Image (cartoon, rainbow, N blue to C red):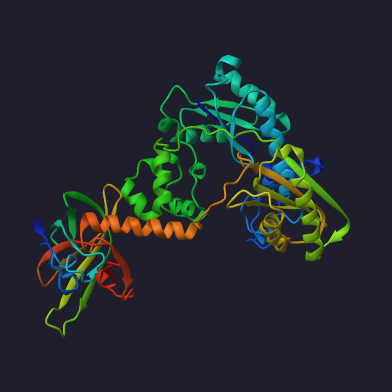
Amino acid sequence: MVTHTGRAGAPGAAGRLTPDAAARGSARRLNEPRPALVETGVGGAPLRVNRREVALLREEWRVVDRWWTEEPLSRCYFELVLESGENVVVFRDQELGSWFTQRA
Amino acid sequence: MIACIVIPGFELRAALREQPARALQPAALAPEPGREPLLGPVTAAAEDAGVRPGMRLSEALATCPSLVLVETDPATVELEWEKLLRRLEDVGFAVEPVEPGCLYFETAGVERLYGGVEPALKRALAAVGPAWDARAGAAERRFAALAAASVARPGQGLIVSDRPAREFLAPLPLSLLPLERERYEQLEELGVRRIGQLAGLPGGAVAERLGPDGRRAWSLARGEDENGAVRPRRPVERVAERLEFPEAVANEVTLRRGLAVLVERLLARDERAGRPPRKLALTARLVGGGSWRRTVTLREPTAELPRLRAAVAPKLAELPAPVTSLRLELVELADSVGHQLELVAEGAERAGRLREGLRQVRASIGAGGVSTLVEVSPWSRIPDARALLVPRDD
């Protein structure tokens, strides 16, 4: 079992935001990814998200974009149902090797 | 304890009050015009012939060619239901009607009057009357009371008191749970046929497969009913005006004129005591038998004739057939008799308040504290690229 933690503010090009961006009056993205603590199984699928057990893996998809730019984006998304019944979406940023949660 | 009274097929029973002989024949409530052709409740004779409620009309007629279709009669249903509620209220039960054929009441207020829960249920069933084949159930929670009433025999009261609700519910059929038809089918395909089987499944898996309704049904199956206390209705004085047409009328202009007369007459009634109507019901008796009913709840109670006409008249366009009579009823009146007018237009005041609120947020959080949501590429596969928050400093 492997544990990964995302680093704040660095989920690929789409989420690149400096903390004082809002203070400067510039626009910022809605639904920014948030770092997550994810434990995965042998196949790479999440088993625990933020220390909560995963009950079910609903869907999994991959987004590869902006590969022609300086800031390519490559994410593996997982839509999960936790034991509590809560639906969550997490992704692994392939460029950074970190995990994030996000509303899809 | 919470008690529940259930009358299966109330709409059909009400529609057959005038023709009791039909109740002994294979008969079913016809689908409403314009809706999916699915049967409503059916008589015992129809059930013996293989016809089931919710069956497709074509399938039912193929199964039982002698099946008689009874026209829906919402006006009679409403009338009979109201009479039944009043009979219960007259003997001391503060009832909360859910829909025609299902109501709840608290037994706490009447237990001492009648000498316990069981005599109270008997009294309630007697007040309903033997003709309706009512069943009663009582339990600590609403769903358990409903389930008990649903499995009781006609005229019987079933009390769930000496064992946990979950244990009582476990062997009961899944159809008692408030789920859509497809959900039952999904569960049956999975081999889940009893409430106890559903309660034994993990909550996360049920929520995933059946959605929020499934999750709620799962909680109910486990005896966890969050919908607690009974909220009895406030008995109201029904005020109504009726207009009989000498012949069937389909012309909307005539109907609108008739409605205007009814509104005028209704507003002139003393029982209103100056209070403006909040909710009205328009009922029509249709030329081919059966009836039609629509209710209108006003956004703001008013006793102004043009506004009432404008609120109710559009419903006339939904009439499925020519009518022989039109009836307008005051279902609910507002508590106040006056209406305070505004000195300043509502919109301007709201905008001013909003500006002031935003100014205060900016002052406490600083620049960038208030933003506008701007959609940039809502179709994007990247969730955080779909919209931007643009700070507003105006």
Say which residue appears at 45% left-offset and 57% top-offset.
B349
Q: Is B18 situated left or right of A54 in this image?
A: right
Is there any visible trace of residue B57 in the rendered image?
Answer: yes
Tell me residue A93's x, y (percent).
15, 68
Q: Is residue B333 above or below residue B106?
A: below
Dividing the picture into quadrants, the one containing residue B43 is top right
Q: Is B245 situated left or right of A17 in this image?
A: right
Q: Is B99 situated left or right of B273 in this image?
A: left
Tell me residue A83's x, y (percent).
26, 48
Say which residue appears at 51% left-offset and 42% top-offset.
B176
Q: Is residue B74 above or below residue B250?
A: above
Q: How many marks?
A: 0
Is there any visible trace of residue A44 in the rendered image?
Answer: no
* Depth order, front residue of A50/B155: A50
Say which residue appears at 62% left-offset and 48% top-offset.
B301
Tell me residue A51's x, y (percent).
16, 49
* Depth order, front residue of B168/B123: B123
* Depth order, front residue of B207/B114: B114
